[in-house]
Amino acid sequence: MMWKDKLMQLIGEENVIVKQAAVDRLSKDFYWYSPVLHEQLRDKVADCAVAPKTIEELKTIVQFAVENRIPLTPRGAGTGNYGQGVPLFGGIVLDLTRLNQIVEVNDTTVKVQAGVKMGILEKTLRKEEKELRIFPSTFMKSTVGGFLCGGSGGIGSIRWGNLWDGNVLEVTIITIEEEPRILNVSGEEMHDYIHNYGTTGILVEAVLPIEPKTEWSQFIVSFTTFQQAVLFCDELAHNEAITKRLLSVCEWPIPAHFQQLKKHLTEDKSIAMLEIAEPAVPLLHELIDKYSGEVSFTISSDKYHKGLKVSDFTWNHATLWAHKHGENITYLQARFDPQRVFEQMRLIREKFELEVQFHFEFMKNKGKVTSGSLPIVEYKSKERLYEIIDFFEENGVSVNDPHTYLLGSGGYNLRMKEIETLKKQNDPYDLLNKGKIPKDEKMELMN
């Protein structure tokens, strides 16, 4: 294509990635968690990719794309699950991982570029007796920009909530115009740039709050029944005397897929996976005894984030392990009614047996403890999948559908009207992550 030759002349042939294997890799994320998305997205690929090293280089690429009306798809490490970083209409993938500078660390905040890996950031902060508030289970690979634009919560959310709960203080955005603007956005307006799949501007920097470092001990606690495990986790979640960073619970047979933990786990037992502040460990043991739990595995605080991590089996890592070692495995994102949770699970189990397997993550939302569910589902067909979703919703279990690439269709309470307004202002030619905001492009793509 002529425009690729022009792009090479503009920024240097060595800076334009055209080798098919590399372009294919950079055009994918973890959408294959969903068989539905796999069918829709597996053949979507960019025409080329670029990896700018400076914001000025990025602005040059944006100007070129606007002048030639070329779609742009921003990308971090590609650990998203919904096709957030998949180019639906070809064009250029913007690999932002070279924008990887930790700009400034002070007592309460850190300023970073979008391509900084969250694992490197957390490790750097802990050397300075600080730590991040929240990060995804994929933090060793995921980038700050990818998490802010495509994620919502994760490790730390049981204490600090999700991205919207004061865990992002400011973002720097580049608009997609003939003369790209640099916007420094904070406060309420910033919420329309979080978890928006990078559709309204390219996030290049962020300011995040940080906290004093805590010494975290990790535990896996086994229970005879899943109900015991859930009740234990619920009381632990509400106990503010026990400082915690992670609180995850999976019913058997999900833990059967956790290969590195097999020698520590007992068949047919449900497990809770925890990160607990070291001074609170004695209180934890009292609660474990109250619910007749058994500590099956521990990692001491001096080995925190050195080698195996309990968090490697939580959040959607649990889905990943089941997908690796099971057959036809996918998942849902659901929210049970706290007053009816055991009744709702009983109805689902009676209807679908082990076709649906339960997994809960405890977190805070606007300061209030809540639990999200990431149930494992044995995939049989798209029709069967949506029959399961319909049954959940008929029985009062809300579902955020992870089997769509469309922003807002997954059930998050995004301010879509505000996002659509920003899209028109910041990306007037609709070039940035084209097709991810629900409108006529969906029909165009499917036809």
Image: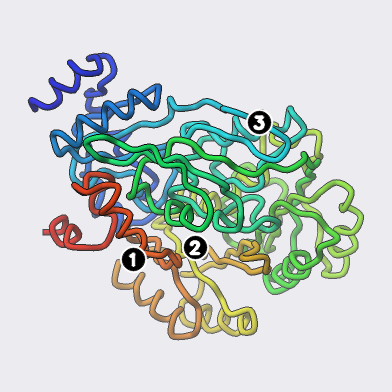
Mark closer to the observer (2, 3): 3
**Amino acid type, callout 2:** Ile
* Cα distance in 3D space between marks 2 and 1: 33 Å
| Coordinates of residue 259 in the picture (x, y in percent) | 59, 45
Secondary structure of the residue carrying tag 1 is helix
Q: In the figure, 211 relative to 50: above or below? A: below
257 or 104, nearer to the observer: 104
Q: How many marks?
A: 3
Mark 1 crowdedness (10 Å alpha carbons): few <14, some 14-19, many ≥20? few
Secondary structure of the residue carrying tag 3 is strand
Secondary structure of the residue carrying tag 2 is strand
Q: Quadrant of residue 146?
A: top left
Residue farthest to the left, as pictured: 2
Disc number for residue 417: 1
Answer yes or no: is residue 254 visible: yes
Mark 2 crowdedness (10 Å alpha carbons): few <14, some 14-19, many ≥20? many
Residue at the image position 60 percent from the left and 30 percent from the top: 120
| Coordinates of residue 370 in the picture (x, y in percent) | 64, 69
Mark toward the start of the polypeptide (2 vs 3): 3
Answer yes or no: is residue 251 visible: no
Residue at the image position 15 percent from the left and 34 percent from the top: 67
Residue that mark 2 sits on: 376
Mark toward the start of the polypeptide (3 vs 1): 3
| Coordinates of residue 295 in the picture (x, y in percent) | 81, 54
* Cα distance in 3D space between marks 2 and 3: 39 Å
Q: In the figure, 399 relative to 83: above or below? A: below
Residue at the image position 28 percent from the left and 54 percent from the top: 436
Residue at the image position 53 percent from the left and 84 percent from the top: 347
Colouring used for the render? rainbow
**Amino acid type, callout 1:** Lys
Residue that mark 3 sits on: 105
Mark closer to the observer (2, 1): 1
